[in-house]
Image (cartoon, rainbow, N blue to C red):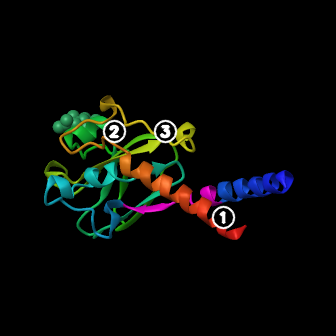
């Protein structure tokens, strides 16, 4: 009986890990919907407010949908992010349907390339969790030094953690149903 239980437990764990790794790489639409890449109408509408409630991991891709004729996405340094300097971006995207894979952990800074938009809050910091925090459930808030600028900075991964926990619960539930 104990042996049966332990082999069940082993296959359950294997399945659970499979489930977790399948659910791992995601395409994340910036702002949670199409055409959210725009000047926010209020601070609570800002993309950084959205980012604070999302969870970004290595391998995930960010997707921006916008009018490529009027706007663009600039990946910039922390300094250029803070000062809304659009003159020397790391990368420029203006195809209207921009997909960018997050290849490493740490902060990524984006501002609008449309004149005056960044100053009005069309900017985004995404902090990608480091791999060692992937399965532990421990995701520290980014240090204030990592994030600067007038826009709302992500301060908590509370709901991201909760979502991860729910995914895990769902995975466990699936395993129990299957066996
Ligand atoms: C913007 O960045 C460029 C390149 O780093 C720099 O030469 C320029 O002085 C900056 N402009 C402002 C207004 O800070």
Q: In terms of secondary structure, where does tag 2 sit? A: loop
Q: Which mark is first along the chain, 1 or 2?
A: 2
Q: CA distance from mark 2 to mark 1?
A: 47 Å
Question: Which is nearer the N-term, disc 3 or disc 1?
Answer: 3
122 w.r.t. 96: above or below:
above
**Quadrant location, the C terminus:** bottom right
Say whether mark 2 is within 8 Å of ligand 1.
yes
The label shown at residue 138 is 3
Image coordinates for residue 120, horizontal then vertical, percent: 14, 52
**Towards the viewer: 23 or 67:** 23
Q: Is residue 97 visible?
A: yes
Compared across the picture, whether 144 is left or right of 42 comes to right
Which of 4 and 166 lies nearest the eye of the viewer? Answer: 4
**What residue is drawn where x is 25% and y is 63%?**
71
Residue at the disc numbered 1: 176
N-term-proximal mark, 2 vs 3: 2
* Front label number (2 vs 1): 1
Distance of mark 2 from mark 3, alpha carbons?
A: 27 Å
Question: Observer-nearest residue: 44 or 28?
Answer: 44
Q: Residue at x 70, y 53 (%)?
A: 13
Image-based side of 160 in relation to 80, left or right: right
Quadrant occupied by the N terminus: bottom right
Would residue 59 be counted in the magenta stretch? no
Q: Position of residue 73 (x, y in %)?
A: 32, 56
């Amino acid at each position: 009986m104990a042996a049966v239980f332990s082999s069940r437990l082993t296959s359950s764990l294997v399945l659970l890990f499979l489930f977790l790794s399948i659910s791992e790489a995601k395409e994340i639409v910036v702002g949670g919907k199409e055409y959210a890449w725009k000047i926010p109408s209020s601070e609570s509408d800002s993309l950084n407010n959205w980012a604070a409630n999302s969870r970004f991991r290595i391998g995930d891709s960010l997707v921006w949908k916008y009018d490529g004729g009027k706007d663009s996405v600039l990946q910039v340094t922390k300094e250029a992010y803070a000062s809304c300097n659009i003159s020397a971006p790391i990368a420029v995207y203006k195809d209207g349907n921009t997909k960018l894979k997050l290849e490493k952990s740490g902060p990524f800074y984006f501002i609008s390339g449309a004149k005056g938009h960044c100053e009005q809050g069309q900017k985004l910091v995404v902090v990608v969790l480091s791999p060692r925090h992937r399965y532990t459930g421990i995701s520290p808030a980014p240090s204030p030094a990592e994030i600067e600028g007038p826009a709302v900075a992500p301060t908590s991964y509370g709901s991201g953690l909760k979502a991860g926990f729910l995914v895990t619960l769902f995975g466990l539930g699936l395993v129990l149903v299957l066996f």
